[in-house]
């Protein structure tokens, strides 16, 4: 069931809203002229009317039970933010130029996560477009945009969205988003949109006035859970499934990143993620281009990506935090909070070989057994990173890796990521060692809510990263500090790091052994000191062998590569990469003992 205000042309607009328990619903036109349009309810609880004389730009509320005026839950645009009226949008205002666009295969994606408000000085969709060429030259072929559903004020990470169909007004609104997507496709870049189906934002959230969108059966970090399996959940499920299809159909989005699916509870016969993947796959077949769903999950549960015919949900890929946690712990030495589960070289080796370190193993941090076995699933079903908005922004000072480790360790982390057999995700600015923090920020208008957010963030830092002064999420300074300093891309060590990322991505695309994400053709080992890792990957066409030294000292080792002659392709210790100087030969021919420079990596090809 299509919901919201759907403009039909010639001044006609179809309004549909689900409110199964209400006795009276009407469309209250606010502008250009004040008038009330009664609606009729069908047997499924949907109120409908097709109105004449309603042009794009018309402002409206729904009037509930004759008195309560509320924005449309499926509003396409909230020009006056979360408390103001909804606006009718003409979907045909943008002339698309992507008719030949067929998308980017999941297994070839190099994902670049960005936040619209801090990615450019303008902080808008328009501000992203001039930088697409440079992202394309880097090798990025997919951008992942943090949530853009309407939130209160003009600065927010996006996870406080109250209107999941409405494109954030301060970013430029619906038309600007479409122009951005079209521009991305012209550059050969897919667009992944981060969507939140586990909660609504707290301010401007009037969804409960319409129907049973929540259930008290389960609790989440944000309160009562979304009602996916309780009484009258039919309209709730439709709301979210239609939202997913809406982004694909109306905005030509290529993939959705589903936020925190571990906070989506559904014990019904068909899990909402199962139904969602069915509907998206059907639309994908209809449109003739592959559409993807990528889940964020804290569960290490392969049911999310297992085929529906085998009892899974059929989601195409999921994030895997184990890779980040183990690599971060190795290069920073941090071992507090959940990092205590990821201290050893063997942990990263397992993450590379099997994806999930905790595959029904006991987790000291969680104090329970955790996870499931993912080793038989291909690498293209897992997204890994060395930084993302959560891992940076949920630190008290919002430090990026560039502020925590040496330049050599930054290069080492880049090598570990881009040589891994998974889909790599870069967090904006990572590619040149951005040094500005990425902090948590909000611009709620409810002062009680602002204070609650402040106190909540302080509580989150109780066990983590206690050093430094707390950064006020409500302060504009906190937001401004988080803006990228894009010009650094062409300066000194930043330029060198950018060129290293570019070269690694090029190698990943051209060497068959790196391009293939089959984890079966893979060997990983760590030395006795637990600081040096050796990895061999191969296909019928080629073999690669690389070494990662996490020690702050040079390490002697014997190559674990197969016999034959190996040519050195890249050594991060080379002068070219502002290293201390390579200690490795240009060719490997035997089992001679070699010296690996501290905090460096090297790649050989046969």
Image: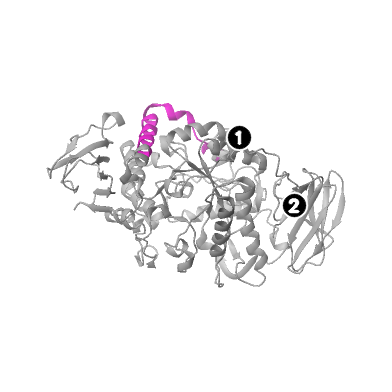
Which residue is nearer to you in this view: 99 or 89?
A: 99
Q: Seen in the image, is 436 located left or right of residue 572?
A: right
Q: Which residues are magenta?
A: 479-505
Check residue 301 in the rendering and tell me which mark sits there, or answer none.
none
> Along the line of sight, which residue is nearer the eye, 422 or 521?
521
Say which label, 1 or 2, has the lower sequence index: 2
Q: For mark 1, what is the residue?
A: 126
Residue ID for mark 2 = 5
Query: How far apart are the alpha carbons under marks 1 and 2?
Result: 26 Å
Instruction: Work out whether 431 lies above or below 87.
Output: above
Establish if 288 lies above or below 490.
below
Asked whether residue 480 is drawn in magenta, I would say yes
Residue 533 in view here = yes
**Residue 585 appears left or right of 353:** left
Name the residue: 27% across, 29% down.
575
Q: Is residue 21 above or below residue 330?
A: below
């Amino acid at each position: 069931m299509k919901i919201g205000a759907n403009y039909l042309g010639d001044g006609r607009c179809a309004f549909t809203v689900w409110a199964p328990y209400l006795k009276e619903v009407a469309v209250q036109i606010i502008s250009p002229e004040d008038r009330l349009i009664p609606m009729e309810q069908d047997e499924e609880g949907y109120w409908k009317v097709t109105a004449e004389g309603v042009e794009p730009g018309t402002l409206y509320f729904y009037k509930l039970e004759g008195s309560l005026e509320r924005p449309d839950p499926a509003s396409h645009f909230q020009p006056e933010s979360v408390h103001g009226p909804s606006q009718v949008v003409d979907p045909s205002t943008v002339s698309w130029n992507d008719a030949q666009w067929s998308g980017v295969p999941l297994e070839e994606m190099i994902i670049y996560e960005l936040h619209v408000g801090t990615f450019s000085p303008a902080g808008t969709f328009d501000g992203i477009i001039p930088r697409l060429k440079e992202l394309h030259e880097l090798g990025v072929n997919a951008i992942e945009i943090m949530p853009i559903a309407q939130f209160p004020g003009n600065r927010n990470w996006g996870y406080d969205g109250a209107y999941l169909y409405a494109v954030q007004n301060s970013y430029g609104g619906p038309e600007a988003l479409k122009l951005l997507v079209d521009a991305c496709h012209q550059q050969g870049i897919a667009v992944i949109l981060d969507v939140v189906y586990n909660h609504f934002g707290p301010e401007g959230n009037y969804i409960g006035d319409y129907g049973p969108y929540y259930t008290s059966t389960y609790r989440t970090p944000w309160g009562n859970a979304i009602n996916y399996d309780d009484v009258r959940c039919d309209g709730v499920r439709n709301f979210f499934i239609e939202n997913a299809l809406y982004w694909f159909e109306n905005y030509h989005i290529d993939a959705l990143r589903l936020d925190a699916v571990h906070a989506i509870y559904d014990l019904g016969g068909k899990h909402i993620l199962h139904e969602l993947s069915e509907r998206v796959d059907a639309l994908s077949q209809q449109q003739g281009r592959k559409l993807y769903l990528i889940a964020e999950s804290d569960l290490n549960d392969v049911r999310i990506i297992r085929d529906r015919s085998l009892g899974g949900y059929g989601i195409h890929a999921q994030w895997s935090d184990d890779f980040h946690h183990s690599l971060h712990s190795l290069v920073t030495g941090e071992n507090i909070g959940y990092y205590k589960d990821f201290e050893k070289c063997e942990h990263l080796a397992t993450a590379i070989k099997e994806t999930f370190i905790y595959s029904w193993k006991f987790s000291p941090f969680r104090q329970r057994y955790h996870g499931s076995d993912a080793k038989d699933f291909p690498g293209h079903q897992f997204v890994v990173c060395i930084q993302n908005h959560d891992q940076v922004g949920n630190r008290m000072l919002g430090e990026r890796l560039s502020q925590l480790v040496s330049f050599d360790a930054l290069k080492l982390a880049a090598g570990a990521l881009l040589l891994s057999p998974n889909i790599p995700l870069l967090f904006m600015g990572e590619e040149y060692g951005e040094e500005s923090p990425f902090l948590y920020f909000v611009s709620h208008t409810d002062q009680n809510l602002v204070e609650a957010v402040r106190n909540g963030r302080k509580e989150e830092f109780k066990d983590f990263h206690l050093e430094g002064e707390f950064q006020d999420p409500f302060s504009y300074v906190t937001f401004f500090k988080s803006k990228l300093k894009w010009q650094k891309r062409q300066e000194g060590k930043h330029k060198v790091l950018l060129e290293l990322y570019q070269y690694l991505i090029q190698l990943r695309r051209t060497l068959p052994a790196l391009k293939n994400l089959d984890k079966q053709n893979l060997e990983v080992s760590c030395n006795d000191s637990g600081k040096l890792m050796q990895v061999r990957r191969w296909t019928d066409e080629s073999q690669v062998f690389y070494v990662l030294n996490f020690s702050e000292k040079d390490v002697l080792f014997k190559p674990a590569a197969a016999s034959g002659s190996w040519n050195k392709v890249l050594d991060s210790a080379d002068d070219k990469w502002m290293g201390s100087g390579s200690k490795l030969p240009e060719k490997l021919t035997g089992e001679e003992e070699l010296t690996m420079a501290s905090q460096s990596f090297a790649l050989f090809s046969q």
